[in-house]
Each structure stands twice: as C-alpha cells, then as structure tokens.
Image (tube, rainbow, N blue to C red):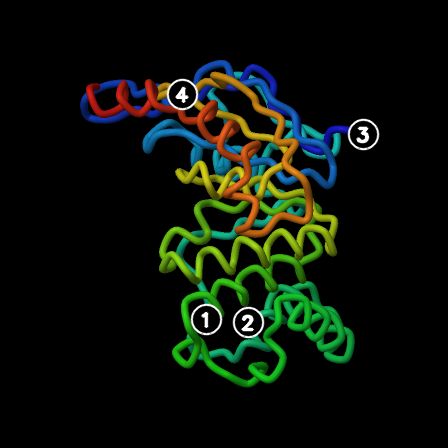
C-alpha cells in the first residue's frame, strides 16, 4: 500500500534563552493510507512537534515531510488536528460546530447538513444536533471534535492525546468507538498517546520515541485480532505485547526523568 505520509531525515531545533534545544533528530517514518498508527513516548520527546511539522504549522530545521508525495511547505488542508482540549465554539450547536469547516469552504447549506448528519450518526450523537458544548459530557464533546475533523474530508487525522482529559471509563468507550469509526471511515489516523494500553487497543503499528531529542527507537507491528474491545486486554497475546512494549519504553521514561 502507498505511503500517504513520509518523514525523511527530519530534525527540529528551537532557540531558547538557554540556547538551542533539539526536539527531534533524524526522524524517518512512513504511514500507509488507511493505517491507524500510534506514537508512544515520554513527555517532551517531540511527538507533538512532529505533528506540528506534518500539519505544516512549523517547518523542519532539516529534512522534509511529504503528504501524498507533495513536500509540506505550509498548512496543509489534507491533514486535520484533533487536540486533547475540545476547541469547540461554545456559542455554536453541535451541528454548527461540525458544519463550520464546510461553511468556510462555501459548501451549500443543504450539502453541509447532509455531510454533518452523516458524521453525527457515525459518532452516535443523534438527538444532540441542537445542543451546545456546555450541555455535553467530555466524551460527547470529543466526539463532536472528531466528527468535525471527519467532516472536513481530510485524508489524515492527527490526534494528539485526544482522550487524555477523559475519565477512565469514558476513555475506554471512546477508544472502542474510535476503532469503529476508523473501520467505517477508512481515514488515515496518527495518534499520540502516553498509554501503552490505549496504543495496543487502537493501533495496527506502534512507533516508540526515545527521550529528547526524539528519535524512532523501535517499531512494533500489532497483530492482535480485530475487532478489538476491552476484552482483548486479558488475552495472553495482549499481555505479551504489552510487556514487550513497556520494556522498550521504560528506559526512555527513566532517561527523561533523570535529564
């Protein structure tokens, strides 16, 4: 399958009052179309910086990033970010929030409604179209964010710890829903998480980052059977893969704490 994202020899440094800080060093990775890739690593390992580069918010210090074989030189409409914070317009309803990007593209009102209704159904928010964000739970707000991102029709969703602010039970439900959404939408999803359990439940492949400067330490293929629910977490295969992943991540977490 063809790569939709290619990161080639990418490094990124920032100038601070204390001098140069290298966030990423010589990153090379590819993401295939339709893949759900998880990136795991300690805090400060450059994961979010990589997302900002892929989305075109910032430029690499060296190297290049390609989306659909085109070098990223600025903000790219083919990649949409979903953040940990919901970033919804509080004065707009669920429907209006999901339609917002479509409205900016000057899509007709009738077509906007058709598209929004499709994704409202996909994220199970029927009946809440006219609700405002303050009337929704955290999980529901994040589903609105995901629906808005899907409605934008970008090929790529960049999800930066999107469930990090949710309670454990809601997070579990959202993980299972994202698996279903991915299977139905066929979008390419790159997902940042600090949770090994979350990465194993969601991903087809895991990339593990070193502590700063972030580098690709290892890659693990996730062969756990699909469809995946919380039940998979008690299987022998799951526990073996989790142990293997933790062994790889543990030293990098310690390095980050000690640095």
The residue positioned 46% from the left and 41% from the top of the image is 197
- The Cα–Cα distance between marks 2 and 3, rounded to whole angstroms, is 34 Å
**Which label sits on residue 1?**
3
Tag 4 residue:
247
- The Cα–Cα distance between marks 4 and 1, rounded to whole angstroms, is 42 Å
Tag 1 residue:
89
Mark with earlier residue (3, 1): 3
Q: Viewer-nearest of labels 4 and 2?
A: 4
Relative side of 181 to 231, left or right: right
- The Cα–Cα distance between marks 3 and 1, rounded to whole angstroms, is 38 Å
The residue positioned 51% from the left and 18% from the top of the image is 218
Mark 4 residue crowding within 10 angstroms, few (<14) / some (14–19) / many (20+): few
- The Cα–Cα distance between marks 4 and 2, rounded to whole angstroms, is 42 Å
Mark with earlier residue (3, 4): 3
Q: Position of residue 170 (x, y in %)?
A: 44, 62
Tag 2 residue:
97
Mark with earlier residue (4, 2): 2
Q: Secondary structure at mark 4?
A: helix
Asked if the residue at tag 2 contacts the one at tag 1, i.e. Cβ–Cβ closer than 8 Å, the answer is yes
Asked if the residue at tag 1 contacts the one at tag 3, i.e. Cβ–Cβ closer than 8 Å, the answer is no
Name the one closer to the observer, 39 or 151: 39
The residue positioned 60% from the left and 63% from the top of the image is 148
Relative side of 176 to 256, left or right: right
Q: Secondary structure at mark 2?
A: helix
Mark with earlier residue (2, 3): 3
Mark 1 residue crowding within 10 angstroms, few (<14) / some (14–19) / many (20+): few
Q: Quadrant of the N terminus?
A: top right
């Amino acid at each position: 399958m063809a790569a939709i994202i290619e990161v080639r020899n990418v490094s990124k440094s920032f100038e601070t009052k204390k001098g140069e800080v290298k966030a990423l060093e010589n990153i090379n990775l590819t993401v295939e179309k339709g893949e759900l890739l998880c990136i795991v690593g300690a805090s400060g390992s450059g994961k979010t910086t990589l997302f900002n580069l892929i989305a075109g918010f910032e430029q690499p210090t060296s190297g290049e990033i390609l989306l659909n074989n085109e070098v990223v030189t600025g903000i790219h409409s083919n990649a949409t970010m979903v953040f940990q914070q919901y970033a919804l317009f509080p004065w707009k309803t669920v429907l209006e929030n999901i339609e917002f990007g479509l409205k900016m593209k000057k899509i007709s009102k009738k077509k906007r409604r058709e598209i929004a209704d499709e994704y409202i159904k996909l994220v199970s928010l029927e009946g809440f179209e006219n609700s405002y964000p303050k009337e929704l739970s955290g999980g529901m707000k994040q589903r609105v964010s995901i629906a808005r991102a899907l409605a934008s029709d970008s090929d790529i969703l960049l999800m930066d710890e999107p469930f990090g602010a949710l309670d454990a039970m809601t997070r579990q439900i959202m993980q299972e829903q994202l698996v279903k959404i991915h299977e139905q939408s066929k979008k390419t999803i790159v997902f940042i998480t600090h949770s090994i359990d979350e990465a194993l439940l969601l991903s087809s492949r895991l990339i593990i980052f070193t502590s700063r400067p972030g580098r690709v330490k290892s890659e693990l293929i996730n062969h756990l059977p699909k469809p995946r629910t919380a039940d998979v977490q008690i299987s022998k295969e799951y526990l073996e893969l989790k142990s293997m992943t933790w062994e790889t991540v543990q030293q990098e977490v310690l390095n980050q704490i000690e640095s």
